[in-house]
């Protein structure tokens, strides 16, 4: 049986600072269960020399390039990808922004998620920046923007969530998979949204009205830089993440949408997925790299390529909070702290750094020392009290 | 060769095809055709929307005119009703009535 064919359409409008990396990432995809053709849709980028450079890069990378004769705006440029997908009989179309970094097997995961239910009408990849569905990170541009990290995170999340699909109120077209049979029924993005924003919300709600599911794939991960390019292009005002005129169209057409969003947030399904994901990130990293416990100091004081568990006193209690690559989570553990932390990570800490210890912390450090952890004292503190 | 060595996606078909001039020209022709066809459809849709919106604008204008006429008629009726009262208040009888009312209020207070 032949593999599902995916047209991977990347919409581009200027962006010399980030588009080349995005295209390299697309060219480096190595799906094993899908057959992918990448098509760059340059919306008549006006920056001098930009389009020529991108076309040349596309040739070097072995991916298709098309520049529209004149600027269409995002919805109509996206439609070029959707039309090509339908016209050339692909099975799926992925619409992607050009300020993103893809994982090697992104299309495999998105397609597998779509195949888990024939009524799935769109699958949005999970990301550090996917509107209110984001996997929160303190500094994604610093921690998550490189290919190695994206691929590791994607593999980890795929192992953790598989083809799980979380129903969401609307898809986000920074990296979204649309099955072509669904496209043929729902149609294209509405050009009423002009230069763009909210067109995929409208498309999603049209698909939902026809009975299709709109889902997020927590098993897929795509780094997304975000709206900087759109501010630079004058699409949105600085400090804004959307276009109020287009939101007004959504409010008029779909008055129940805001209630659906509020209901979704109340359901808590995404909150649980976030907790599961960050737990998995911490455990996996600790398993590979070990982890360090800081007592009394801040994790920010420690430059380390491994998880850091910050132990701080909150009243009589010690609260452990784990940090790694801009992700953070409180460890919900019970019982004796030394055993509980060791059990949570599956191993004792490789090191314990003591900054402002209390007697309790001293006892804990002694417990970890007994398990083989290195104790590193950053204060003049007696070895026994 | 640049980055081509590292550049294959999926089953690796695309990398070879992209550097084939006939593939590039064929893709461009197909995309131009799709773009033109869709632009014509977009134009038809936009035109239909303009016609529809113009019709609705005319209907809304008509409603506005109707409402303005109603407001004017109501204003005229209101004036017709309030004018005799104003005339009465200006008359000697009206002046006397006002003083009587003032006395009555002070007695009540």
Image (cartoon, coloured by chain):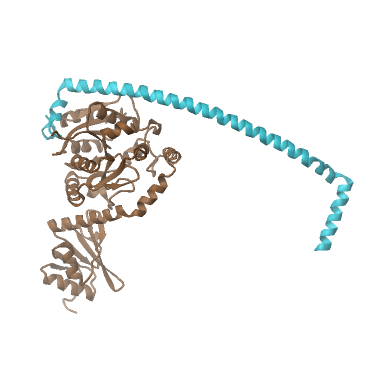
Chain colours: A brown, B cyan
Q: Is residue A14 visible?
A: no
User: Residue A206: horizontal and vertical position, in percent?
Assistant: 36, 37
Q: Nearer the viewer, residue B5 or A185?
A: A185
Picture coordinates of residue A261 (x, y %)? 38, 48
Between A331 and A94, the one lying in front of the other is A94
Quadrant of the rendering where the C terminus of chain A is positioned: bottom left
Q: Quadrant of residue B38?
A: top left
Tell me if residue A97 comes above or below residue A55 in the rendering: below
Residue occupying the point 28% across, 56% down:
A272
x 22%, y 76%: residue: A359
Q: Nearer the viewer, residue A45 or B80?
A: B80
Residue B55 versus residue B98: which sits nearer the camera? B55
Give me the residue at 75% from left, 39% from top. B79
Q: Residue A93's x, y, as percent?
A: 25, 34
Would residue A160 be seen by someone viewing this image from the given angle? yes
Dividing the picture into quadrants, the one containing residue B90 is top right
Quarter placement of the N terminus of chain A: top left
Residue B51 lies left or right of residue A300; in this view the side is right
Q: Is residue A173 above or below residue A80?
A: below
- The total of numbered circles placed on residues is 0
Q: Give residue A348's position: percent from left, percent from top.
A: 14, 65
As drawn, B26 above or below B109: above
Residue furthest to the bottom:
A385
């Amino acid at each position: 049986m032949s593999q599902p064919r995916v047209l991977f359409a990347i919409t581009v409008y200027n962006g010399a600072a980030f588009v080349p990396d995005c295209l390299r990432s697309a060219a480096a995809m190595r799906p094993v269960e899908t057959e992918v053709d990448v098509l760059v849709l340059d919306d008549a980028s006006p920056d001098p020399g930009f389009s020529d450079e991108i076309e040349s890069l596309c040739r070097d990378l072995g991916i298709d390039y098309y520049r529209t004769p004149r600027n269409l705006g995002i919805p109509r440029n996206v439609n070029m990808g959707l039309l090509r997908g339908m016209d050339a009989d692909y099975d799926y179309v992925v619409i992607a922004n050009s300020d993103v970094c893809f994982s090697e097997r992104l299309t495999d995961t998105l397609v597998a998620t779509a195949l888990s239910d024939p009524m799935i009408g769109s699958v949005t990849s999970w990301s550090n920046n996917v509107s209110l569905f984001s996997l929160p990170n303190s500094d994604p541009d610093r921690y998550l923007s490189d290919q190695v990290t994206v691929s590791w995170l994607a593999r980890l999340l795929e192992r953790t969530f598989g083809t799980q699909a979380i129903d969401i109120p609307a898809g986000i077209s920074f990296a979204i998979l649309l099955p072509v049979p669904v496209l043929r029924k729902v149609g294209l993005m509405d050009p009423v949204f002009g230069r763009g924003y909210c067109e995929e919300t409208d498309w999603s709600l049209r698909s939902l009205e026809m009975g299709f599911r709109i889902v997020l794939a927590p098993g897929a991960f795509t780094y997304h830089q975000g709206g900087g390019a759109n501010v630079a292009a004058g699409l949105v005002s600085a400090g804004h993440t959307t276009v109020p005129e287009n939101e007004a169209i959504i409010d008029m057409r779909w008055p129940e949408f805001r209630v659906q969003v509020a209901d979704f947030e109340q359901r808590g399904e995404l909150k649980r997925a976030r907790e599961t994901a960050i737990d998995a990130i911490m455990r996996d990293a600790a398993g590979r790299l070990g982890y360090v416990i800081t007592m009394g100091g801040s994790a920010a004081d420690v430059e380390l390529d491994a998880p850091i568990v910050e132990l701080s006193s909150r009243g009589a209690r010690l609260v452990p909070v784990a940090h790694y690559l801009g992700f953070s989570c409180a460890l919900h553990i019970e019982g004796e702290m030394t055993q509980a932390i060791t059990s949570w990570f599956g191993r004792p800490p490789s090191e314990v750094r003591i900054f402002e210890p209390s007697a309790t912390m001293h006892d804990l450090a002694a417990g970890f020392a007994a398990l083989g952890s290195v104790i590193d004292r950053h204060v003049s503190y007696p070895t026994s009290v | 060769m640049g980055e081509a060595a590292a550049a294959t996606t999926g089953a690796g078909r695309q990398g070879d095809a992209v550097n084939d001039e006939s593939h590039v020209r064929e893709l461009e022709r197909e995309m131009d055709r799709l773009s033109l066809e869709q632009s014509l459809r977009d134009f038809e849709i936009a035109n239909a929307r303009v016609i529809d919106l113009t019709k609705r604008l005319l209907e809304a204008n008509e409603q506005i005119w109707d409402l303005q006429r109603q407001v004017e008629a109501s204003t005229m009726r209101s004036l017709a009703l309030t004018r005799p009262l104003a005339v009465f208040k200006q008359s000697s009888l009206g002046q006397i009535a006002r003083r009587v009312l003032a006395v009555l209020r002070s007695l009540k207070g």
